[in-house]
Amino acid sequence: MTYEIIIALIGFAVASSITPGPNNLMLMASGANYGLRRTVPHMLGISLGHAFMVTMVGVVLLRVFETYPVLNIVLKVLSTTYMLWLAWKIANAVPPEASEVTGKPFTFLQAAAFQWVNPKAWFMSITAISAYAPQDQGILIGSLMVAGVFAITNLPSITLWAWMGVQVRRWLGTAKRLRIFNVSMAVLLVVSLYPMLMHA
């Protein structure tokens, strides 16, 4: 992998990791509801789970999708259904009369598994492998190199969103304001599906 390709890949990884999407919106909601410390497993699950996903996309899944295009449609339907369910869960994290947040933050494994139904994660993985994986290193090594760059750049990018959620919590104050925030995050999560699904 040349110096120029590494710089380009880092730029793509940072830009795609730090821009709004399902992972970042959920992290902001988690930071606001549960605090930064309890959101750390969620953040690590995203970073390491997505790195694993990038590797698998490079080694196996691109060839499977080329052979069976219908799997793209199946994945899109399953992803959309799951994301809508998550949006509902976020919107209802605080009952109207509650004074404390209900529910639990994502665990490491839940966050890692979520990458497989996240349309943005699929877009990032396929684009990165297709555009930046070095062809002269072999499929596995090339995929691992791309995944490594993503793992290094992704965690600082997504941490910013969880931190912003913690800062927002200071101004929420009441259950009513927190409920409005959670509903807003749920709506944004649903809206974030549109451009990614259209691109897919």
Image: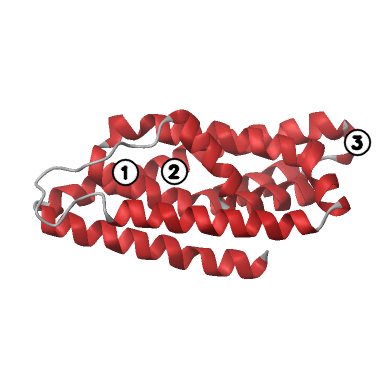
Q: Is residue 2 visible?
A: no
Depicted 2 relative to depicted 185: above or below: above
Q: Residues within 10 Å of mark 1 (few under 14, many from 20)?
A: many
* Tags 2 and 1 touching, CB below 8 Å: no
Residue at 45% from the left image edge and 59% from the top image edge: 84
Where is residue 21 drawn, in percent x and y?
48, 56
* Image mark for residue 136: 3
Placement of 82 over or under 60, stated as above or below: below
Image point (22%, 42%), residue name: 102
Label 2: how many Cα within 10 Å (few below 14, some 14–19, many 20+): many
Residue 177: quarter of image: bottom left
Q: Secondary structure at mark 3?
A: helix
Residue name at image x 56 percent, y 51 percent: 118
Residue underneath mark 2: 158
What amino acid does circle 1 point to?
Ser
Q: Earlier in the sequence, mark 2 or mark 1?
A: 1
Residue 127 image offset from top left, x and y in percent: 71, 53
Judged left or right of residue 25, residue 67 is: right
Q: Earlier in the sequence, mark 3 or mark 2?
A: 3
The residue pinned by badge 1 equals 30
Q: In this view of the protein, which residue sits in the foreground, 2 or 142?
A: 142
The alpha-carbon separation of the residues under discs 3 and 2 comes to 31 Å
Looking at numbered disc 2 in the image, what kind of residue is underneath it? Answer: Ile
Figure quadrant of the N terminus: top right
Residue 20 disc label: none
